[in-house]
Image (cartoon, rainbow, N blue to C red):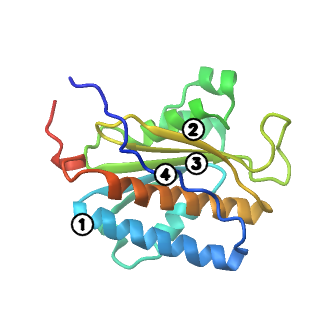
Amino acid sequence: MTAPEPWPEVPSVLPQPGAGAERLETLVVDAAAGLGRLLQARGWTVVTAESCTGGAIARALTETAGSSAWFDRGLVTYSNAAKQELLGVRASTLQSHGAVSGETVTEMVLGALGGARDRLALAVTGVAGPDGGSPDKPVGTVWFGWALAGRVPLVRMHRVPGDRRQVRLRSALLALEQACALVTACPPSDGINRPKD
């Protein structure tokens, strides 16, 4: 069995600091439609595992007519129990690192990916506010994860600015835009065309 490869070098997408909520709504839907076109061209599907975004990513993905061709499922795992039951996040990970951590989002995105070879998975967990922040994890701390069969999960943390609605929308937008960049950078041999081990 070959070891997972890292993702191609792709610049990190940053939160959109200037856009208002209405503009962000439009940008999220546009990014979701763009991701759908990329996935359909490759014959891939996408699955989402969301916590702080509360299903905003899945909602945006299904705004596009015909999205059933490339959108597989969306899981909103808001509680720790849901993360464990639906995604296989370990209780020890949650106890040691908390729900808002790189360790937890890694287990979330791998749980969402499962064993599928033609599926892109993305996961988000964070502190949307206005409460729930701490000195080491202030409001706006959001962890993101992306996974594809045969590749090491990509995990990044961003401080996302704005009020609760803006944090959630900016996080959804960042997750989708980064997914677009990653899919674009992957060679055609990835996913379903990758030879079985």
**Figure check: 58 above or below 123:** below
Q: Nearer the viewer, residue 74 or 172?
A: 172
Q: Position of residue 1 (x, y in %)?
A: 20, 23
Give the residue at mark 4. 11
Mark 2 in CB contact with mark 3 (< 8 angstroms): no
Tell me if mark 2 has few (under 14), some (14-19) or many (20+) residues whose alpha carbon lies within 10 angstroms of its own.
many
Considering the numbered disc 1 on the image, is that residue within a helix, a strand or a loop?
A: helix
Give the residue at mark 2. 83
Residue type for callout 1 = Ala
Mark closer to the chain start, 4 or 1: 4
Q: Quadrant of residue 172?
A: bottom right
Residue 86 visible? The answer is no
User: As drawn, is 82 to the left or to the right of 148?
Assistant: right
**Figure check: 21 above or below 4:** below
Name the residue rendered at 73%, 75% in the picture. Answer: 20
Mark 2 in CB contact with mark 1 (< 8 angstroms): no
